[in-house]
Amino acid sequence: MPNDLLMSIDNEEILKKITEYSGLFFTAEEISILINISVSELKKELRNKESKTYKAYMLGKLTTMTNIRKNQIALAKNGSPGAEATIEKLRKEQELSETKF
């Protein structure tokens, strides 16, 4: 049965659903219920950063985060102090991560 389960996670339709649901910031537990897959198997796949499941999950999450950041940048450009502070924090985090290349 575990092999059948892994094959179902690797299914393109399931991967698209994982991308969609992670982009809506559902947890792994919630996604497992929505796609009817064992939470332990889903989490196992998500721990493997080379798996299609992990990449599908991250694609959804990062796509939504990209849209949110675009909105934050637009607000910052229009003078929103909160948005400016958020963007400055993100810029500093990015620069810090660049020291680890």
Image: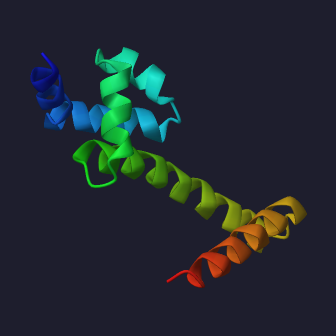
- Residue appearing at x 41%, y 25% in the figure: 31
Residue 84: x and y in percent read: 81, 69
- Along the line of sight, the residue nearer the viewer: 45 or 25: 45
- Residue appearing at x 10%, y 22% in the figure: 4
- Residue appearing at x 33%, y 29% in the figure: 42
- Along the line of sight, the residue nearer the viewer: 2 or 75: 2
Residue 2: x and y in percent read: 16, 21
Left or right of 35 on screen, residue 83: right
44 up-or-down from 60: above or below: above
Left or right of 30 on screen, residue 99: right
Q: Image quarter for residue 11?
A: top left
Identify the colour scheme used.
rainbow
Residue 39: x and y in percent read: 38, 21
Left or right of 25 on screen, residue 73: right
Q: Image quarter for residue 97?
A: bottom right
- Quadrant holding the N terminus: top left
Left or right of 64 on screen, residue 49: left
- Residue appearing at x 84%, y 66% in the figure: 85
73 up-or-down from 47: above or below: below
